[in-house]
């Protein structure tokens, strides 16, 4: 559950408790604290990136947002990039549509995979750099899909 949602629940719970108690009992009652943020919340991704497309040089990061955290080396920038790519009613991780007209350029063997939850929805996306469309898709997430050693 995202931190802001937990805070709202805590405030509503405190308000309901306060109205149910008498004035003297309310003054003595402790205010409930919000539950701590856990990385299993709605904005949590596991990012696996490989420069060669193989497991030998792959690196895996965890990325939590709202608040930013995890093992990703640029968590704040990655969360900002994900927030910028998120538009209501559109999947920011959608694959290139079948039959799309893409340039024949090749961006190298790098691959990446994102798994987890973003904006309350499950994410299971794969990225490569095999043509112009895939390179553009990768570049939209360049901070999130940070290559090992870069």
Image: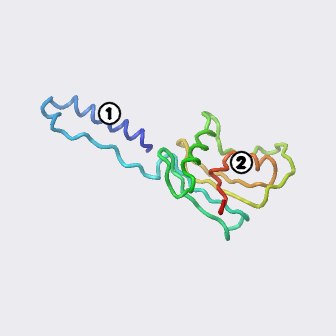
To which quarter of the image does residue 129 belong?
bottom right
Q: Which residue occupies 60% across, 33% down?
A: 88
Residue at mark 2: 139
Kindly give the residue lying farthest to the left in the view shown.
Answer: 24
Tag nearer the camera, 2 or 1: 2
Task: Pick the residue in front: 112 or 70.
Answer: 70
Kindly give the residue lying farthest to the right in the view shown.
Answer: 104
Q: If the image is split into quadrants, where does the C terminus sit?
A: bottom right
Could you tell me residue 31's position as x and y percent? Answer: 25, 39
Residue at mark 1: 12
Could you tell me residue 53's position as x and y percent? Answer: 72, 63
Q: CA distance from mark 2 to mark 1?
A: 42 Å
What mark, if any, has residue 147 been given in the picture? none
Could you tell me residue 131's position as x and y percent? Answer: 81, 51
In this rendering, is residue 18 above or below 75? above
Q: If the image is split into quadrants, where does the N terminus sit?
A: top left
Is 129 situated left or right of 94 in this image?
right
Could you tell me residue 119's position as x and y percent? Answer: 54, 41
Question: SS of the residue at dot 2?
Answer: helix
Task: Pick the residue in front: 13 or 75.
Answer: 75
Q: Which residue occupies 29% across, 36% down?
A: 13
């Amino acid at each position: 559950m995202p931190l802001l949602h937990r805070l709202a629940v805590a405030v509503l719970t405190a308000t309901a408790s306060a109205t149910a108690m008498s004035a003297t009992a309310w003054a003595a009652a402790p205010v409930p604290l919000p539950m701590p943020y856990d990385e299993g919340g709605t904005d949590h991704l596991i990012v696996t990136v490989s420069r060669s497309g193989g497991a030998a040089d792959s690196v895996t990061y965890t990325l939590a947002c709202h608040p930013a955290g995890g093992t990703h080396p640029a968590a704040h920038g990655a969360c900002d990039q994900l927030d910028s790519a998120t538009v209501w009613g559109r999947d920011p991780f959608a694959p290139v549509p079948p039959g799309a007209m893409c340039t024949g350029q090749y961006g190298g063997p790098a691959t990446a995979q994102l798994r987890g939850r973003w904006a309350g929805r499950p994410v299971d996306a794969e990225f490569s750099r095999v043509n112009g469309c895939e390179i553009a898709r990768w570049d939209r997430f360049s901070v999130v899909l940070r290559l090992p050693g870069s």
